Amino acid sequence: MKLLVSGLTGQLGSGLVEAVPSELVELVPLVRPLASRDGAARLRAAFPTSPELAARVIEGDVTRPHWGLDAATIRQLAIGIDGVLNLAGETNWAAGRRELDATNVRGAVNGYELTRALEAASGARKLYCHVSSIHAAGGMTGRVPETPFEADERRTPYELSKWLGEVALLGRAERQDAPSLCIARVGGLLGSSATGVTRRRNSLYMLADRVDGLPFGILPISRSGRVDMLPRDVAARLLIDALLALHATPPEAPQIIHVCAGESAPTTDAVLRALASLDEGHRAGRLRALRVPTRGIVMATQQLPRYQHLARTWHNALIGLRYLTFERTFERSRLAALVSETLPVATIEQLIRLAFELPAPRVLPTHDDLSLARFAR
Ligand SMILES: NC(=O)c1ccc[n+]([C@@H]2O[C@H](COP(=O)([O-])OP(=O)(O)OC[C@H]3O[C@@H](n4cnc5c(N)ncnc54)[C@H](OP(=O)(O)O)[C@@H]3O)[C@@H](O)[C@H]2O)c1
């Protein structure tokens, strides 16, 4: 399978390069140039052991129509490409509506229209996979199915932009002769399961980074939130396996899948208890949970930034509390039906060791509600 991929320089993109054998999937990266470096130079710097990526690079910007590709480039690409995978996203939860919507809504739609143009140029069916987020669920709790989400006033601007991206794509997919659509809602991403290398962006990393600044080490959370995260390479491999299945049997109707830890995601309580035992005597192990109702966290994360200027890092950390708070389980049955292997299970020790960068212990502690797997270093 040959895929045009945006967002390869990000956390999930790095996981894709780490986890997906080039014999299985050929990646054609779409990268935006920076002032001082072109796309090829950026890819050489990001992936020094995969020089073929820089050699194949196409420069573009997802906020532009057809991601900035001209008709000649589209015609050239159309011949061999099987699909388009949109990993590009504005992932700064504290960003403004304009930036969030430009990438997460307009960028998503531009990718779909680009796929349509590739179909028109080749006369062959193509797949468009847009990576959304489980956080598009807003304030939903309980079991969260792999189906379209309803409007929800409790969404943050980031969550709203991810949801609006989904709504816009699902609307377009209803038209006649529309390209096949897959919306992959990805869960939180940890660093590589093999090396621990990461881009520090998500709730657990933000907590890990801010532990020293929490007054008296107190962490306000609700009782039974779940921490739904997978290492980036594990999530990327899962996503690609699903896309291979969809490529083999193109779907008639849009597919929504949850690429996340699902029912194996541990509770925040369990994570904090395991953290205390694994990080005994150190800063993170001294965290104390202050129980607050979910409603309080939802209100604080929505309202506080409106009335109080928060530094970007604290703003992100505040929003990150939501993703340690919601008592919900993301269903993975549609994903399971697509991929042949057993779905990956989140292990609490790996989660903690990756996020808090703890060294592997000589003797593993035991824990009541989780099977602990040794952290691969
Ligand atoms: N990380 C998580 O925990 C998480 C959880 C759930 C869902 N997701 C979703 O998964 C996707 C990937 O996330 P990530 O963590 O890999 O994000 P990331 O590390 O922030 O990387 C974002 C990627 O998007 C690219 N990008 C942004 N704006 C672009 C534009 N206008 N044109 C072209 N490329 C652009 C960036 O390129 P540059 O290098 O040029 O900036 C970068 O490669 C996003 O849609 C995100 O919402 C992530």
Image (tube, helix red, strand yellow):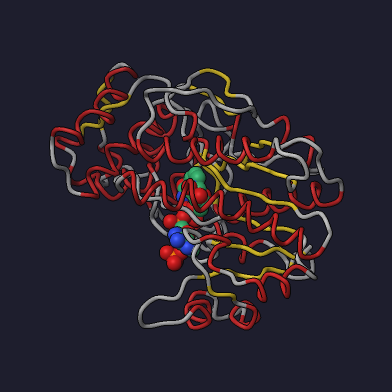
Whole-percent x and y of residue 127?
74, 52
Between 314 and 178, the one lying in front of the other is: 178
Placement of the N terminus among the 4 image quadrants = bottom right
Q: Is residue 215 visible?
A: yes
Q: Is residue 197 visible?
A: no
Identify the residue at horizontal 71%, vertical 37% (top origin).
254
- To which quarter of the image does residue 371 belong? top right
- To which quarter of the image does residue 16 belong? bottom right
Give left or right: position of 253 versus 204: right
Identify the residue at horizontal 63%, vertical 41% (top origin).
183
Between 209 and 269, the one lying in front of the other is: 209
Give left or right: position of 127 versus 265: right
Identify the residue at horizontal 31%, vertical 37% (top origin).
319
Whole-percent x and y of residue 123?
83, 60
91 relative to 157, above or below = below
Whole-percent x and y of residue 336?
75, 36
Count of numbered circles in the view: 0
117 relative to 158, above or below = below
221 relative to 199, above or below = above
Identify the residue at horizontal 72%, vertical 29% (top origin).
333
Whole-percent x and y of residue 8?
55, 64
